[in-house]
Image (cartoon, rainbow, N blue to C red):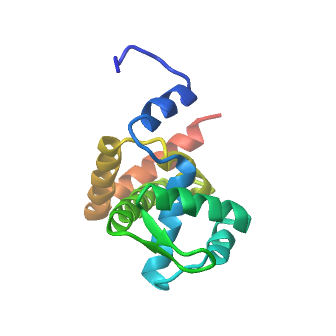
Amino acid sequence: MNEKEFYTVRGYQLLEQNKSSLTPAMEDYLEMIYRNSLQDGNLRINKLAELLNVKASSASKMVQKLGESGFLNYEKYGNVMLTEGGKEFGEFLLRRHRIIEDFLRFLECDNILAQTELIEHNINTYTLENIKILNDFFTSNQEIADRFKQYKKRMRRSVP
């Protein structure tokens, strides 16, 4: 992609989606299954639907798609279990979520969860790693982080 070519947000999403076989919804399901696997170890469709605030029939369809893609194993009316590939990708998705969430928390944004969900599916790994480095920098340099927050506060007061 040429840096001087502009696209709509949806256009950029389609370009990125062509690089990945997973839709944002599939990523959300996989991330939630991975999160749950860290705590409970097993997960049923009804519980997954509850965690994502969707109907059990929707969760069942998505689990089937993820199973066909090789990310998980499931038994009808049984447990949903991640494959090794599903665990690896789920770990990446959760890491991506936490990096963005930490960044937004540092910026003291409002509605952090909703903003994280909107951003995480539209960010490339290079930008994500740069945000991680910036998060680590501010964590390791508290005095600079404090100076930034003071600067931000002054700038907010000066904007009408």
- Residue drawn at the location 53% of the way across and 48% of the way down: 24
* 41 vs 91: above or below: below
* 102 vs 37: above or below: above
* 123 vs 50: above or below: above
- Residue drawn at the location 44% of the way across and 67% of the way down: 72
| Place of residue 46 in the rendered image (x, y in percent of width and height, measured from the top left) | 67, 75
| Place of residue 133 in the rendered image (x, y in percent of width and height, measured from the top left) | 27, 52
| Place of residue 84 in the rendered image (x, y in percent of width and height, measured from the top left) | 32, 69
Q: Is residue 81 visible?
A: yes
Q: In this image, 41 relative to 124: left or right?
A: right
* 7 vs 96: above or below: above
The quadrant in which residue 75 appears is bottom right
Closer to the camera in the image, 98 or 133: 98
User: As drawn, which residue projects farthest toward the right?
Assistant: 55
- Residue drawn at the location 65% of the way across and 34% of the way down: 160
Q: Is residue 108 visible?
A: no
The quadrant in which residue 88 appears is bottom left
